[in-house]
Image: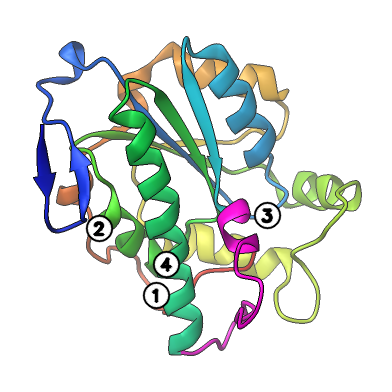
Amino acid sequence: MEVDSSHAVIVRRRGSWENRSVALYVISGVPASGKSTVARLLARRLEQAVYVPGDTIRAMVISGRVNAAADGGDAQLHQLQLRYQATLAVAAVYLNEGYDVVVEDVIIGQVVRHFLAYVPVHEMHMIFLDPSAAAVAKRDEVRTKTAYGEQWSARQLRDVLHLETAHIGLWLDSTDQTAEETVDQILADPRASLIVPTQLAAPVARRRRRFGPPR
């Protein structure tokens, strides 16, 4: 075990995927795509796992929080980076103690490269949930909160997902799936979602936008 000074967390160096005893799963997608439900169910299906929602980290900022907006500035980007770093720092604590970790957050567009730069392990599972616009709208109607309104529309965020996000990991059209069926598909072929973050922590998308969407 050694200290990785670039991330200031303790990281266990591991061998190939077949010899690894723990795994980091990251569930992403637009708001109301089913991320939280799928992430919790996935964690329950693993033998010893922790669920780390990015929204919980965001809520820890009690004052001085910069609300997400399409034309957000450097302060918004900085807070988003802090959220990613804090989320993955919590994940690293449990990974180093032998737990699998399931992280869930809105990680789309150009900010994907920032997130990947903070990942504390050599390999991870990246899953993007991509239900239809109608399915997203229906799910958003029954949520206690909404991410859509004056600042962002569902269509805008789906454009960020489809046009500005590097096509890495496993992308799932979960429109007609139950959350349990989505988890089944994730676990059926772990290699389909496996990526090496250090090889992908660079912008790959077709259009540029500096900032990610709101929760």
Label number found at residue 117: 2
Quarter of the image where one finds residue 196: top left
- SS of the residue at dot 4? helix
Of badges 3 and 1, the one in the foreground is 3
Of badges 4 and 1, the one in the foreground is 4
Residue flagged by tag 4: what amino acid is it? Leu
Q: Mark 4 points at which residue?
A: 82
**Which region of the structure is painted magenta?**
55-73
Q: Mark 1 points at which residue?
A: 207
Of badges 3 and 4, the one in the foreground is 4
Query: Mark 4 packing: few (<14 Cα in 10 Å), some, or many (20+)?
Result: some
Determine if the magenta segment contains residue 56.
yes
Residue flagged by tag 1: what amino acid is it? Arg
Q: Position of residue 160 (x, y in %)?
A: 52, 66
Determine if the magenta segment contains residue 112.
no
**N-terminal label among 4 and 2:** 4
Q: Position of residue 6 (x, y in %)?
A: 14, 58
Q: Name the residue under label 3.
A: 31
Alpha carbon distance from label 2 to label 3: 23 Å
Alpha carbon distance from label 3 to label 1: 21 Å
Q: Where is residue 141 in the image (x, y as percent from the top left)?
A: 90, 52
**N-terminal label among 2 and 1:** 2
